[in-house]
Image (spheres, helix red, strand yellow):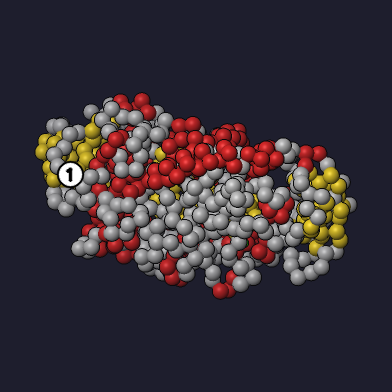
Amino acid sequence: MKINFKNFCSGSLLTGALLCGVQTACTTTSMESQYASLPAYNGEDLELTVNDNGTHFRLWSPQAEAARVYLYNTDSNSVATDSLEMTRDENGTWVASAPGQLYGMFYTFRINHNGKWLDETPGVWAKAAGTNGRRAAIIDFAKTNPEGWSEDRGPVVNNINDVIIYEMHHRDFSVHASSGIENKGKFLALTEQGTRSVLGDKTGIDHLKELGITHIHILPSYDYNSVDETQLASNQYNWGYDPYNYNTPEGSYSTNPANPVARVVEMKQMVKALHDAGIGVIMDVVYNHTANNDDSNFSLTAPGYYYRHREDGSYSDASGCGNETASERQQMRNYIVNSVKYWAQEYHIDGFRFDLMAIHDTETMNEVSAELKKINPSIFVYGEGWTAGDSPLPVERRALKENVSKMPQVAVFSDDIRDAIKGHYSNAADCGFATGKPGNEETVKIGIVASTAHPQVDYSKGNNSKFAYAAAPTQIINYVSCHDDLTLTDKLHKSMTDANEADMMRAARLAQTIVFTSQGTPFMFAGEEIFRDKKGVHNSYKSPDSINAIDWTLKQKNAEQFEYYRQLIALRKAHPAFRMTTTEQVAKHIVFDSVEGENLISYSIVDNANGDAWTEIKLVFNGSKEAREANVAEGEWTIIAQDGKLNAEGMGTTNGGKLEVAPCSALILARVK
Ligand code: CA
C-alpha cells in the first residue's frame, strides 16, 4: 500500500527498528499493563444479532461509562427514531435489545468516555452499511446469497505455489471505454460473460480464463474512506488503503451505495461468477492502520486500545499513514482473526494479502492462517513482510519477511527478486538483471530458489537479504511489479533509455519468465500481459482513470506479448518442477551451471523434479545486450523458449552443445529422457 509514504523494504529498517525495540520496554509499560488488564470478548454476537427474539446489540467498550444505540430509518440526513440505553455485560461488553427483526433499519453506537459523549459510530463490526458507511445497516444475510451459493466453492489449492496471482483494482480492470464491460468499475464487472474490447478481443472474466491465471487479488474491497459514495458520477479513484468499515464491502463498487443490500449481493455475485470460471478470489486486507485517528471507529468504541503509541502518547506510525494498530492486544488480535474468518465464511474468499504485515506480530499471523485453514484448507495467506516506518513492536515479534520461518503457513513478497530483475524500486532509472545491469546475478538466484538454503547460492552477495529466510519455497511470492511503484512497463521506459518499445517488451518477457519459472508463487499486476502502463505515475493511489485504467485496445496491439504470457502461464501450470514444496527438493533438483561473464544465469531442474514428466529442464537467462553462449549437455532437447518466443508445448528440437542465447531473452529446453 501507499498513501503518501514510501514503503521501505525491511532491510533498510532493521537498525531503527532495533533501537525502537529497546525503547519500548521502558516506555509503554503502564499503558500496556492497563490494556492487558481489560477483558476481551470473542463471541460471534458482537454488535448485532437478529434472531426470533428480536434485534440485539453487544458493543465491546470496557472503559466506557455509558453506551447507547441509536436507530434510524435512513442511512443519512434523518433523526433517530429511537435510542436504547445499553447495560454492562460480560467481558467489557454492553448490551441492548429491541423487539422484532429490525431489517431495513440503520444504527449507530455512542459511548461516554471520561465523562464525555463521543461521536456516533457504526461500530467496528458493521457487516452492512449505508452511504459512506456512516450508519450500520440491519439486513437479512440469508437473502443476500446468489443462486447456488451453498454449493459454491473456490479452486482447490494443495500448495500456495500452485496458484498464479493476478493483482487488480476494480476500476483499472473495467472502467476504460474500450473494455466492452457494462458495469464499469463495479463488482458486477467480474460477472459479465462474453465481453469483448472495441477491437473484438476478450475482456473481463473471459480474458482471465484465456490468460490462465488461477486467482485474482483484488485491491481493498472493504468499505474505505476516501471515495465519496454520494458523488459517484464524478469518477473518483482511490486504491482504498484507508479502511473505514472492515467487514462491509466498499459502496462505490456497488451499483447503489445507499442500498446496503446491493454491495453485499453484488460482491457475492462476483465471487460466484469467478468461482464458476474456476478462479479464486484473494482480498487485500489492511488491518495495520485506519483512515482516521481519534475519530476512527476503533477510537470511538474503545479509545486508545486498538493502537500503538509513542512515549509521549502520540500515535506511533509504522504504516506511514498516521497510526498503527496493536495486534498483540487480545481484542485486536481477535478482531483480525474473526474478520478474515468472516470474509472466508460469508463471502467464500480464497486467500488474504496482508498489507504492511510486519506491523502485525507473528503470533497473530499464525492464528490467522491456522483459523482459516480450519474453514477451508485451500485458503492461503501472504503479505508484505515489512513496515513503512518504525514501530514500538519489537523486531523479533514482527511478521517481517526475515521472520517468515516462524510463520509456516504464511508467505511474503520477495523484494529480493523484484529489485534484482528490474532495478531498485526507489530509483526509476536504475536497471536490473533483465535490463543489463551487472551485479544482480546472485540475488536473482536467491529468487530462483525462493530464498531457501541452497548449496550453490551465496546469500552474502544478496542485495537485500543476507540469509535464506524462507523455510520452504511455499513462503515466497515472486513478482516484478504490483500496484505500488512504477508498472513494469513504466519502469522499463524510464530505465532503458536507448531502447525502443520492442526491446522493452522483450525485457518484460525475460523479467516475467524469471518470475514464472522460479520456485515460490508467481504474482503479476493486471494488464502487464498486454504491456499496460500508468503514464509514468509511480504512486497512482488517487490518480484519475486516465492514468490507472487498462486500455484494452493494447491487447490487439501487443498480441504477441499476450500470447507469450499465456504460454508462460501454461508452462508453469503443466510442470510441477517449477512448484517444489520443500527446501530439500529445491536444493537437490536445482543445479546452477558456472558461466563466464555477467548478466547470465544458467541452471537445470533435474531428475523429474516434484514428479515432473520432464527429466531435465534447462533455463538460461541472458540479461545483457549481446548474444551469449550456453553450454548444454548433448542429447535430444525440445525448445520451449528461445529468442523472445515461448511455446509450452515446444517449438522444435536441438541436440544441445554450444547454443546461442539471444540478447535479453530466455532459453528454455526440456528433455523427456
Ligand atoms: Ca466507502
Residue plotted at (67% across, 49% down): 304
Residue 513, above or below 454: below
Residue receiving disc 1: 598
Q: Amino acid at mark 1?
A: Glu
Q: Answer with left or right where residue 341 lies relative to residue 1.
A: right
Circle 1: element type: loop
* Label total for image: 1
Measuring from the top left, give residue 178's x and y in whole percent: 43, 69
- 252 vs 444: above or below: below
Residue lying at 67% horizontally and 38% vertically, measured from the top left: 33
Which x, y percent locates residue 503?
22, 59
- Residue 40 visible, this angle: no
| Quadrant of the rendering where the C terminus is positioned | top left
Asked whether 259 or 624 is in front, the reply is 624
Count neighbours of disc 1 (C-alpha within 10 A) and say few if under 14, some if 14 to 19, many if 20 or more: some
Left or right: 406, with 26 as reference point: left
Q: Nearer the viewer, residue 320 or 379?
A: 320
Residue 241, position as x, y percentages in the image: 54, 56
Q: Is residue 572 above or below residue 69?
A: above
In the displayed image of the protein, which residue is found farthest to the right?
99
Q: Position of residue 35 (x, y in %)?
A: 69, 41
For residue 76, which quarter of the picture?
bottom right
Rendered residue at 35%/48% (across/down): 418
Is residue 633 visible in the rendered image? The answer is yes
Where ligand 1 lies, by quadrant? bottom right
Query: In this rendering, would 593 be left or right of 215?
Result: left
Query: Which residue is located at x 63 percent, y 39 percent?
Result: 29
Q: Work out which residue is located at the far bottom of the displayed protein and give it.
A: 234
Instruction: Locate residue 163 relative to residue 560 in the image: left or right.
Output: right
Indicate the quadrant where residue 494 lies: bottom left
